[in-house]
Amino acid sequence: MNEKLTYSQVQDYYGKVLQTSSDLKTDACCTDEGLPNYLKPILSKVHDEVLMRYYGCGLVLPEQLAGTRILDLGSGAGRDVYALSALVGESGEVVGVDMTEEQLDVANRYRDFHADVFGFERPNVTFHKGYIERLNELDLAPSSFDIIVSNCVINLSPDKASVLRQCYELLKPGGEVYFSDVYAERRTPQHLIDDEELYGECISGALYWNDFINLAKSCGFKDPRLVKSRPLAIENPALQQKIGDRRFYSATYRLFKLDDLEPACEDYGQAVRYKGTVDHHRDQFVLDEHHVIETEKMFPVCGNTYRMLADTRFAEHFEFFGDWQTHYGIFEGCGSVMPFSQGDSESVVRSDSACC
């Protein structure tokens, strides 16, 4: 698909065709996955016009946000930006980037409104018009963000490799990309990619999941971690007929910028113990779908997981045991089977020790 044509089609679809989230024809780009209780009062303060133009496919809400600097790719009308702005607090900052003028008009209209309802002296959010493939054209300093989020947008990009490479450059060491997007169980044929409706509905632009894993690794994110996933419900008969028996998934990944991560989960006999001190996560800390770490319980981890906790903003919330002196081999089960849930994925898979 031609890049300029893709931009034009997506801008038209999200700026003119879609006026509210109810105009979407699938749940690919408009689903809230079990909002946590602490987020509900925050969203209740977000302006109705901003909420009406929400097109996300997941919940981009990583832990330990106070005082952080966050970049939202494809921020749209700003729902996630404003929710995150309440959680980073007045000492933090959230920056949104979007290419659609109509969406940015809505987002910018309510900067002062949200600063007021959240009790801030001044807005802690800014919005830029730009392309997520060309973040280097914006006034964004390298290694200046703690977290980059995106909610059902990267699938719409004609150059996903460029997006991930520039994310890596903009993150601080130990920072992460935490994003929800749509993925395919297999590669999508060109005639479906060229279908404007399927593309706009966040379906046919989706990467084959294993291509995404390899792409993320090639861009510097050596150990992508799946946080949660769910099969998409495509209830529109016309769209379902177009895609046939192909399956698509909404999935949330976290990608850490850590240079010392290894290609696989290696066992050094290490363990961590969570102190229960992250706000809103007193009983357990969920790093990903295989690492649900209960408070005060000794939890064996691979070397990569150890680094994801010890060399990031999470370090103060854990005790660390073991060193790098003895290598015991690879954790069993570290492979390339499709990782997504095939059914009900409301609850995270729990494991006491399995690392992969």
Image (cartoon, rainbow, N blue to C red):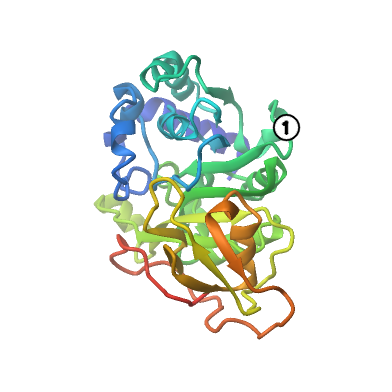
Which is more toward the observer, 7 or 38?
A: 38
Which is more toward the observer, 168 or 10?
A: 168
Residue 342 lies, in percent from the top left, at 34, 69
Compared with 122, 334 (above or below) is below
Image point 30% across, 60% down: which residue?
Answer: 346
Could you tell me the amino acid type at mark 1?
Answer: Ala
For the question of whether residue 356 can be seen, the reply is no
Image point 72% across, 82% down: which residue?
Answer: 326
Which residue in the structure is indicated by mark 1? 141
Residue 7 lies, in percent from the top left, at 56, 34
Residue 302 lies, in percent from the top left, at 60, 73
Which is more toward the observer, 76 or 38?
A: 38
Helix, strand or loop under label 1: loop
For the question of whether residue 164 can be seen, the reply is yes
Q: Quadrant of the N terminus?
A: top right
Image point 69% across, 40% down: which residue?
Answer: 170
Please give left or right for residue 169 compared with residue 287 in the image.
right
Please give left or right for residue 141 compared with residue 104 in the image.
right
Please give left or right for residue 52 compared with residue 254 in the image.
left
Residue 27 lies, in percent from the top left, at 31, 48
Compared with 82, 299 (above or below) is below
Please give left or right for residue 349 compared with residue 101 in the image.
left
Q: Quadrant of residue 19?
A: top left
Mark 1 closeness class: few <14, some 14–19, many ≥20 residues within 10 Å? few
Image point 43% across, 18% down: which residue?
Answer: 115
Q: Quadrant of residue 254?
A: bottom right
Which is more toward the observer, 294 or 220?
A: 294
Report the label total: 1
